[in-house]
Image: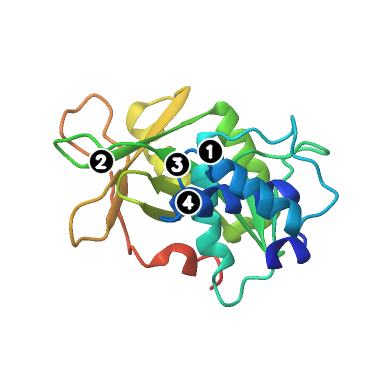
Amino acid sequence: RRAFANGADASMVWAFLVHMTAACPIVGSGVYVQVAEAIFHKWVPGVTLCGQMPITLKDMLHGGALIQIAEFPTFKAINSFEPRKDEKSKAAFIINTNTGVYFKYGTNPNKRWKEYSFVFNKANFEELDALKAKFGDRAFIGLVCVKAREVCILSATDLYAKRDERTAANGSPEDQYQLLVAVRPRQSFRVYMNAPGVKKTSLAQTVVSRNDFPQSLFD
């Protein structure tokens, strides 16, 4: 409710509620959508949900990450980012007024290396270009490692550096780039791309503290 009052659009409030009610131990799995809808109408009167905001996995995952942001002490507002005029992103958000974050999701890690895979294609980079053009060093990537229930936060600048490193090693640009996040017990995240054409070899690794999200968005 505080987020909506500070400018978050209705879909953001809906994402919060879907996640909270689904995770609540006293709300049955078959009724959490109805509970979320009831709370929504109480908090955001006059806004209809019918046919506008179907429940998706992204609603659930956005909700989990956005709740952590909304609970941060210096949080004020969250809104969808518009990479182009009158076109709201489904993955990028404006935090307060000076920070942008773009979310990607990895569901399960590979068994051997405990790596989550995040693929960035040309469309993803076009949206990130717009985010970075607006927010510069305040543009971030939220890498949601679903099974681990962790979010690894990486600056967009670091992602672009890793793309450039991979391109240089490959000798030419690629249609898409795979970013890997290793999530191992009692260790910080390790973020990297693999060396092209060489098995079991990574390019430069970035170590990211598990405590950086959502702190980095407000520093």
Amino acid beneath label 1: Lys
Tell me how the rendering is colored.
rainbow
Q: CA distance from mark 3 to mark 2?
A: 30 Å
Looking at the image, the residue that sits furthest to the bottom is 73
Callout 4: SS:
loop
Q: Few, some or many C-alpha atoms within 10 Å of disc 3 (few <14, some 14-19, many ≥20)?
A: few
**Mark positioned earlier in the residue sequence (2 or 4):** 4
**CB contact under 8 Å: marks 3 and 2:** no
Callout 2: SS:
strand
Q: Residue 29: which disc?
A: 3
Q: Nearer the viewer, mark 1 or mark 3?
A: 3
Q: CA distance from mark 4 to mark 3?
A: 7 Å
Please tell me which residue is depicted at 54% across the width and 60% down the height of the picture.
Answer: 67
Q: CA distance from mark 4 to mark 1?
A: 20 Å
- Up the image or down, 134 lies above or below 48; here it is below
Q: In what quadrant of the picture does the N terminus appear?
A: bottom right
- Up the image or down, 213 lies above or below 107; here it is below
Q: CA distance from mark 1 to mark 3?
A: 17 Å
Residue 115 location in percent, x, y?
25, 40
Q: Which residue is mark 2?
A: 115
Q: CA distance from mark 2 to mark 4?
A: 33 Å
Tell me which corner region of the image, top left, top right, bottom left or bottom right, holds residue 105: top left
Callout 1: SS:
helix
Looking at the image, the residue that sits furthest to the right is 46
Q: Nearer the viewer, mark 2 or mark 1?
A: 1
Q: Which residue is mark 4?
A: 27
Count the marks: how many? 4
Q: Which residue is mark 1?
A: 58
**CB contact under 8 Å: marks 2 and 1:** no
Callout 3: SS:
loop
**Mark positioned earlier in the residue sequence (2 or 1):** 1
